[in-house]
Structures are given as C-alpha cells and as structure tokens.
Image (spheres, helix red, strand yellow):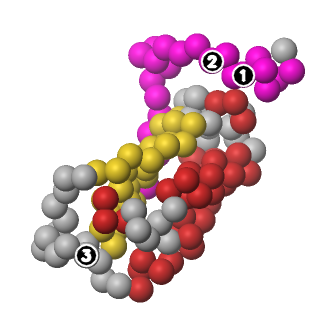
C-alpha cells in the first residue's frame, strides 16, 4: 500500500506539469519491482499558503513523502528512494538553475497494527 504524496508551493503551477510528475513517480516506483501495480498511489497537493526561507516570491518547494508497508530491506528502501529522487531531480533540473528551489523526499514505514485498508483494485489487476 505505497502512498506517494507530493506537496508543492503554488508558484510551481506555471513551471511544472504535476500530472506528468505523478506519472513519472508512478513509473519509477513500479520499475523498482518492489510494489504491486494495484497498490501504488501518487498524488500532488498544492500549497496556496507558504513562507519559504527569506520569503522571496520566487522561492519554491516540492516535498515528497512515500509511505510504504513493512517488510522491505533497508537496502531496497534506499535504492527506491535514490531512484525516485534522481528521476524527479532530473525532471525538475531547470528549477535548480536558480537559487530559489528546494526538493525533499522522505520514506516512512506504515505500522501494520495501526493501518486498515480494503482495495478492490488488487483482485482486478491480479486476474482474480
């Protein structure tokens, strides 16, 4: 049940196609081979209110959070994070040409005792 959330400053709307970024992240996550297709969810949330660093209006951020179930090795989690971060960093390379952009990623494991879910997509994609 990997959930990938992207939170970004509203001033990126004119500079980044968030739909394409979500599709890129989905492809990259699935390419690791560690997650089932029917489990992965990627979404982006625009932050209309924010204050960044010295508050220059051109300052922007994109923060990524990846919540995953337990059971993967530290090496697999690190490899996954590195693959995602590299793909997104490359996609957003133009933003790093100015001194006004911050990018971050964190991977967190979901405690299975405190997580409830029901997924009707899995049976369809698993061929029932």
* 85 sits left or right of 65 in the view: right
Q: Which residue lies furthest to the left in this view?
A: 54
Where does the magenta region start and end?
105-127
* 96 sits left or right of 48 in the view: right
- Would you call the spot at circle 3 few (<14 residues within 10 Å), some (14-19), or many (20 or more)? few
At a point 57% along the width and 47% down the height, the residue shown is: 77
Quarter residue 103 falls in: bottom left
* CB-based contact (under 8 Å), mark 2 and mark 1: yes
Task: Tell me residue 70's x, y (percent).
Answer: 55, 30
Give the number of callouts: 3
Task: Tell me residue 112's x, y (percent).
Answer: 50, 19
Task: Tell me residue 100's x, y (percent).
Answer: 29, 77
Q: Distance between the residues labelled 3 and 2?
A: 41 Å
- Identify the disc placed on residue 58: 3
Nearest to N terminus: mark 3 or mark 1: 3
Which residue corresponds to mark 2?
119
Of residues 80 and 15, the one nearer the viewer is 15
From the viewer's perspective, is the residue at label 3 or at label 2 nearer? 3
Residue 69 in view (yes/no)? yes
At a point 70% along the width and 46% down the height, the residue shown is: 30
Quadrant (top left, top right, bottom left, bottom right) of the C terminus:
top right
Of residues 48 and 81, the one nearer the viewer is 48
Residue 106 in view (yes/no)? no
> Dot 2: what SS?
loop
At a point 37% along the width and 65% down the height, the residue shown is: 12
Q: Which residue lies furthest to the bottom in this view?
A: 97
Q: Is residue 68 above or below residue 87?
A: above
Which residue corresponds to mark 1?
122
């Amino acid at each position: 049940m990997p959930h990938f959330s992207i939170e970004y400053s509203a001033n990126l709307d004119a500079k980044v196609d968030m739909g394409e970024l979500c599709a890129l992240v989905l492809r990259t996550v699935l390419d690791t081979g560690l997650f089932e297709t029917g489990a992965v969810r990627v979404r982006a949330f625009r932050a209309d209110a924010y204050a960044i660093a010295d508050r220059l209006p051109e300052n922007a951020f994109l923060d990524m959070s990846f919540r995953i179930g337990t059971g993967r090795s530290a090496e697999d989690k690190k490899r996954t994070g590195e693959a995602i971060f590299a793909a997104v960093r490359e996609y957003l390379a133009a933003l790093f040409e100015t001194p006004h952009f911050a990018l971050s990623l964190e991977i967190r494991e979901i405690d299975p005792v405190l997580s409830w879910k029901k997924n009707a997509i899995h049976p369809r994609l698993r061929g029932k």
